[in-house]
Amino acid sequence: MKEKDVITKIENVVYQILQKEGSGHDWWHIERVRRMAVRIADAEHANRFIVELAALLHDLIDDKLPENMKLDIHDVEQILERMGISDEDVLEIINIIQIISFRKQTPSSQLSLEAKVVQDADRLDAIGAIGIARTFAYAGAKGNLIYQPNDQKGTDAIGHFYDKLLKLKDLMNTATGKCLAEERHQYLHTYLEQFYREWNGLNELEN
Ligand code: ADP
Ligand code: NI
């Protein structure tokens, strides 16, 4: 099968599974990550085919997915094998998906260039205006609060900014990813500033 046809087929498989996902891992997250990953892959001279396929498949084994959408890693492997992708490429794609889905962090130095690229693209979708939207969508889907002042456990959405979002800029792997993360990271700070102003009853007129 031609590479372009493989991509279209995989795209359809993922779309069918994730189109109605409601906690921020929906098809549009996948589509944004895929587009961003390809952009970074080109800038970093990574293998575009591997990057695009891994980006499309990166969330299918995630524990955050509802049980009826989650696939086993062996299912993903089978899907790829059935498309006639080489064993070497299947192994690389499966590796990337596992690295992205595991909660524990693999040091950047141990990642392939393609894994670095997909991870950067995924992390970029967790910050900036869209990252903020996803964080509140996730909190809503899990029944968590928008903000719980002094919540040490940080189960509220604002707490997640400090637990994770604000740390992502310094975890970016590639030069392109780092550069793209800057503006989105700044926007998190701008957003939090305004959030607290409103929370504390300060408005534009009072300054
Ligand atoms: P990824 O898409 O990189 O796999 P995660 O699965 O860690 O990222 O998270 C997916 C989305 O859900 C992210 O946008 C993240 O901000 C949000 N999220 C994860 N955990 C929480 C949480 N405890 N509260 C609010 N949002 C969360
Ligand atoms: Ni993701």
Image (cartoon, rainbow, N blue to C red):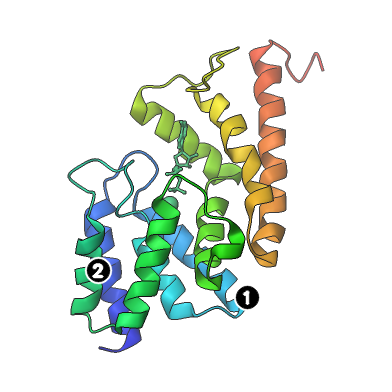
Give the structural element (helix, strand or loop) at label 2. helix
Amino acid type at image mark 1: Glu
User: Which image quadrant is residue 59 in?
Assistant: bottom left
User: Which image quadrant is residue 203 in?
Assistant: top right
Rendered location of residue 33, percent (x, y): 47, 60
Amino acid type at image mark 2: Glu
Determine contact: label 2, label 1, CB under 8 Å.
no
Task: Give the residue drawn at x 48%, y 79%.
Answer: 48
Dividing the image into 4 quarters, which one contains the N terminus?
Answer: bottom left
Query: Cβ of disc 2 within 8 Å of ligand 2?
Result: no
Say which residue label 2 marks.
Answer: 77
Q: Is residue 29 visible?
A: no
Horizontally, residue 56 falls left or right of residue 127, namely left
- In this picture, is 23 found above or below 105? above
- In this picture, is 181 found above or below 135? below
Say which residue label 1 marks.
Answer: 44
Task: Give the residue drawn at x 25%, y 64%.
Answer: 76
State how many labels appear. 2
Query: Cβ of disc 1 within 8 Å of ligand 2?
Result: no
The earlier-in-sequence mark between 2 and 1 is 1
Viewer-proximal residue among 16 and 179:
179
Viewer-proximal residue among 35 and 154:
154
Rendered location of residue 89, percent (x, y): 36, 79
Say which of marks 2 and 1 sits in front.
Answer: 2
Horizontally, residue 202 falls left or right of residue 174, namely right
Horizontally, residue 34 falls left or right of residue 181, namely left
